[in-house]
Amino acid sequence: MVDANRLLSMRRHVAVLGVVFLVVLAGCSGLPMSDDGSDAPLNDTEGDAPTDELTYPAGYDESGVANASEALATHDAAIADRPTQAQTTIRLAIPGEDGEETVQQLTMETQTDGTGAEYARIELTESVAETYRSGDGVVYTRIDDGENVQYTADEVETPDTFSLGTFGEALAVTDLSLDSVSEDEPRRLTYSGSGVLDEETAFGDVEDVETEVVVDEDGAIHSFSVSYTVPDGADVEASFEFEYDDVTVEEPDWLDEAAQTAA
């Protein structure tokens, strides 16, 4: 039987993540849009792979992730003040006694142009929230719960950022291997693997972890995915994807109304 208290806690955590995304506005410096290197074929790293010429970003080596904390910090540093478009999905599937799954999902899209303008759209269950940060440091928020629309305006000098560190333990315990290296400049390294996490996470105890990360030689992560299997049968999947540099942030059409309402 599924532990009701645990599943309630897991549901709350997904909801809390939604609130965190609202507060941080531009978690882009810890988040993701997909750039999987499909424009350039990936070369198998076995055999004659040019590993002697490959530059491994800090925290990584030929065997996988040598230091998860360093790897994630390297990512944050590599994309600091860099125009970024990101997409995040966190999906929680909870089995029911009738065999049917209950699915709760959070999706978030973010854009930042590197000059201080940032936009985010967060969808959680039946609610949609959007935030816009202008260059003057004011964060405008629009929340639509399906019945009511609310606006807020807050001055935030230095917003916190949502960090991939929430899932850092998955990198730390996964037995990753280097699957492929692209021909891009800087080249992208694809690592994947699985492992067992013997400690409680924000989602409860975890049996199995599967992870894939695509990172370039500078340490910027282009995609990161992780899945947890929880002993009671629930599954948690999270994916983060990034695109960099060619990003334009436009003012949302609700900005004037938000400014007038929150004034």
Image (spheres, rainbow, N blue to C red):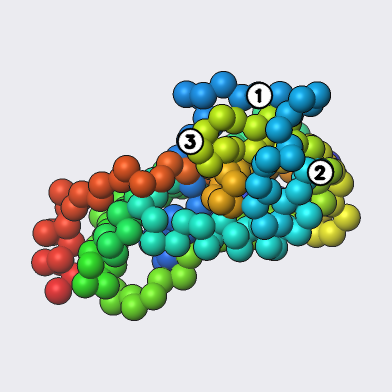
| Mark 1 residue type | Asn
Residue at label 1? Answer: 43
Q: Is residue 76 above or below residue 97?
A: below
Viewer-nearest of labels 3 and 1? 1
Decide if residue 114 is on the left or right side of residue 46.
left
Decide if residue 213 is on the left or right side of residue 31.
right
The image quadrant that residue 194 belongs to is: top right
Q: Which residue is pictured at 18% across the width and 62% down the height?
A: 258
Look at the numbered disc 1 and give the secondary structure of its residue: strand
Name which of mark 3 and mark 2 comes first in the sequence. Answer: 3
How packed is label 2: few (under 14 Cα within 10 Å), some, or many (20 or more)?
A: few
Q: Nearer the viewer, residue 232 or 117?
A: 117
Q: Is residue 32 above or below residue 100?
A: below
Q: Nearer the viewer, residue 187 or 141?
A: 187
Residue at label 2? Answer: 63
The image shows residue 17 at horizontal and vertical percentages of 54, 57
Look at the image and tell me in which quarter the N terminus lies.
Answer: top right
Q: Nearer the viewer, residue 257 or 133?
A: 133
